Amino acid sequence: MVETLHLYCRYIGVSVRGQMQYRASFVLMSIGQLFATGMEFLGIWALFYRFGSLVGWSLPEIALFYGMIHCAFAFADGFGRGFDVFPSMVKSGDFDRLLVRPRSTVFQVAARDLQLMRVGRLAQGLLVLLWAVGALGITWTVPLVGLLLAAIAGAACFFVGLFVLQATLSFWTIETLEICNTLTYGGVETAEFPLSIYRTWFRWFFTLVVPLACANYYPGLAILGRPDPCGAPAFISWLAPLCGPLFLGASMLVWRAGVRHYTSTGS
Amino acid sequence: MAAVTVEDLVKTFRVAERQPGTLGALRGVVRRRHRTVHALEGVSFELQPGELVGYIGPNGAGKSTTVKILSGILVPDSGRCEVLGRIPWRERVANARDIGVVFGQRTQLWWDLPVVESFELLRDIYAVPHERFRAARAELVELLDIGPLMDTPVRQLSLGQRMRCDLVASLLHSPKMLYLDEPTIGLDAVSKLAVREFIRRLNRERGVTIILTTHDMDDIEALCSRVIVIGSGRILSDGPLEALRARVTTERRLIVDLADGAGPFESVGAEVVMREGARVHLRFDPARVSAPELIARITNGNAIRDLIVENPPIEEVIARLYGEADR
Amino acid sequence: MRGYASFLAARMRVLLQYRAAALAGFGTQLFWGLIRVMIFEAFYRSSTAAQPMTMDEVRSYIWLGQAMLILVMWGPDTDLRDMIRTGGVAYELLRPLDVYWVWFTRCLAQRTIPLLFRAVPMFLVAGLFLGLQAPPSPGSAVAWLGATLAAILMSAAFATLISLSLLWTISGEGMCRILPVVCWVLSGLIVPLPLYPDWAQHVIMALPFRGLADTPFRLYIGHIPASESVPAIAHQLVWTSAMVVIGRLMLARGLRRVVVQGG
């Protein structure tokens, strides 16, 4: 276990050093990403400026949800990048190289790349989150802080799980399926707002089929001290962060099935 | 105990067919057509520890499929396969510890890293104890003379240099089995010789069992005492190189350098294969006319400057063997 | 001319092969459109005050945005980027063609074909099921078409500019990341431009980016009446011409730079 962690750090070190070689480019790209993702919030601010409130939710409350999901996605996107580029690996046959090595394939793919640039999204997510915390005036207790951190970590696991599923699909088809981008980037967009504002069927989909609601909505409710307008019981908020790791575990099982399929049909 | 046992391996693939033209592309949107490729149709052979075997065949014959199955990347449809006492695809990780693989066209080193760092990363991946790693690396680096290259990023290496580094990389964990897929492809003459010499020494001095897949017949002639020929998914020949040659043809070649203009050769009992100015290549069957007798007949009617008797080029032998397989 | 036709045909064939991707891209856009519509619906529910646009107008605006999305999506032309990086751009100078217009035509082609592929199904689906309404008058429809043509030209000019920026910074990452985002915001694809604060409207309306999306969309839904279409389209064309001029200047200086460095 320790040895695997050590190896992971080695891999990451390689990736980071490679990116640091192009330092100017990295800084530019990070700043660029900060702006690119931050523009979203600009739009939200403009709409609040005009409309005043969103079905009873205030801008700082939205900012909390926004900050949570963007921080989580930044972590997931930064660490899980290996899965993002995985389809090209299958196409080029480089996956065979991984199979010939005495290590788990998931590990090798996950360790391949750590995208430092994602710090741009993380930075703007943190800024928005910190502003929200300041503007909301919540009395922070230890459990609440823990819930916030656990929620972000859990949401990151959830997104990595989506990345793994997306990568697994490339075992079955050469074509890149954008439907996964829909769920990841679309999921981030959706979760910027509390799920209660969306239509009913949409809400159900993102609670039961794809557990996006557990990523930031339910924990956010507990942090804000608001009951769910849709009537979910309060304890769900505290269980929600577990969803992400469970989802990730399930997606790893699907990955294994994918590898089995690959080794029996070749490419 | 045999190092590698392969029995009746069968493997088929379903390949999606791309239909030509715009109309075909539109049709392809609605329904995909598939074609079945029979990559392996009952392949069997056995390797003893320490053998150096050439595995040759035309493109699409099933060479890479076999090697993939042996390295645990692919699962066959049926048949038995054991490498060093394990079933490769069932115990992928354990099998991976004992094998080394070199793909001619693709490097396993990290593109942007200096060679030495790739080696260290591999050491950690294969969990090689530090002492053993240091010893192995020192020896291999010296054998393949890549000392001066250690700090160069892989992307800056020439093809020959990269191949030598890849060879070292594949052996850092002292595997017992080595699969070499086209290791000399695209290399300059000097590098080819260095690689060949290295492979020979590796096999002879360390007893590493090696399967060499290649299209380069010089590699085969230089290195392999045993050659397995595969064509269309079946083993066509398995045995010493000489036996292969003899099986396809007993004929031999006579190359004559004439002192002056070429005389007619029809009556000597040999067939003219090629003329290059004053040099004539003849093909003859030693059963019908022996070499000394043929030489006598030729020197009788012509002034000779020089002559050589040799075996037909191995490419021709193999080509005929493939041709037989198609029939 | 035939060369261009066969080039287009070949690209179409490539596009057809990635059938699942084509479908899924459409699905993604439906999803995005739906989210945006729902968000705006929620906002409109939250206030009874009069707004510069009605919810129906906003809905049509959003779906038009999804249909025309490609006009606002830019990455650097990867072929051009590789060409510049490897120095092959020198070959461009050897051809007996005006380099700028060749690059411009490339950007144009890269926009028109996918645009048709995406816009037609989007119009059908959004029009039939999702509340995209038809233009209120034939005049509006004509005005919209004209504005769309102008928008395509402007988009190509912008994309050419972005590609040209690669002549300066080989990675080109900075400009390529920031400019598309700025454009994204200021063209109306995040929030319909009239809904931005009133004090910002002057600046927003003066900038070129509205010509990419906002102008044709609002002509379509009649928010800008057909009678006022001429100044709107003129705005688009003036800015497009300006960008062409800037682009040509950039190209001249940029090529000189590349050649001098011995690329």
Image (tube, coloured by chain):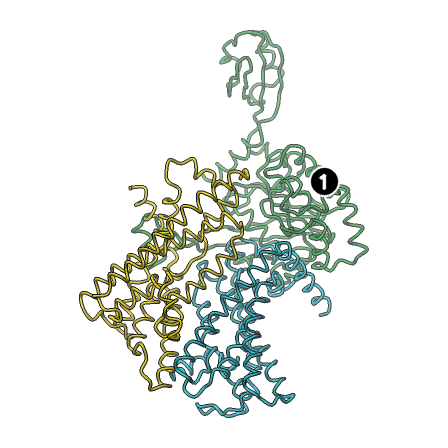
Chain colours: A cyan, B green, C yellow
Tell which residue pokes out farthest to the left in this image.
Answer: C138
The quarter holding residue C101 reads top left
Q: How many marks?
A: 1
Residue B148 in sight in this render: yes
Residue at 73% from the left image edge and 60% from the top image edge: B127
Residue A246 in sight in this render: no
- In the image, taking residue A226 as reference, residue B181 lies left or right, namely right
Q: Nearer the viewer, residue B127 or B36?
A: B127
Bin the neighbour count of mark 1 within 10 Å (Cα to Cα): few under 14, some 14-19, many 20 and up.
some
Question: Chain letter of disc 1?
Answer: B
Q: Nearer the viewer, residue C123 or B64?
A: C123
Q: Nearer the viewer, residue A125 or B52?
A: A125
Say if A197 sits above or below C137 in the image: below
Q: Position of residue A153 (x, y in %)?
A: 59, 77
Mark 1 highlights which residue?
B198
| Quadrant in the picture for the N terminus of chain A | bottom right
Q: Secondary structure at mark 1?
A: helix
Q: Position of residue B165 (x, y in %)?
A: 69, 45
The quarter holding residue B105 reads top right
Q: Position of residue A204 (x, y in %)?
A: 42, 83
Amino acid of disc 1:
Phe
Q: Position of residue C24 (x, y in %)?
A: 39, 65
Say if B318 sits above or below A16 in the image: above
- In the image, taking residue B318 as reference, residue B164 lies left or right, namely right
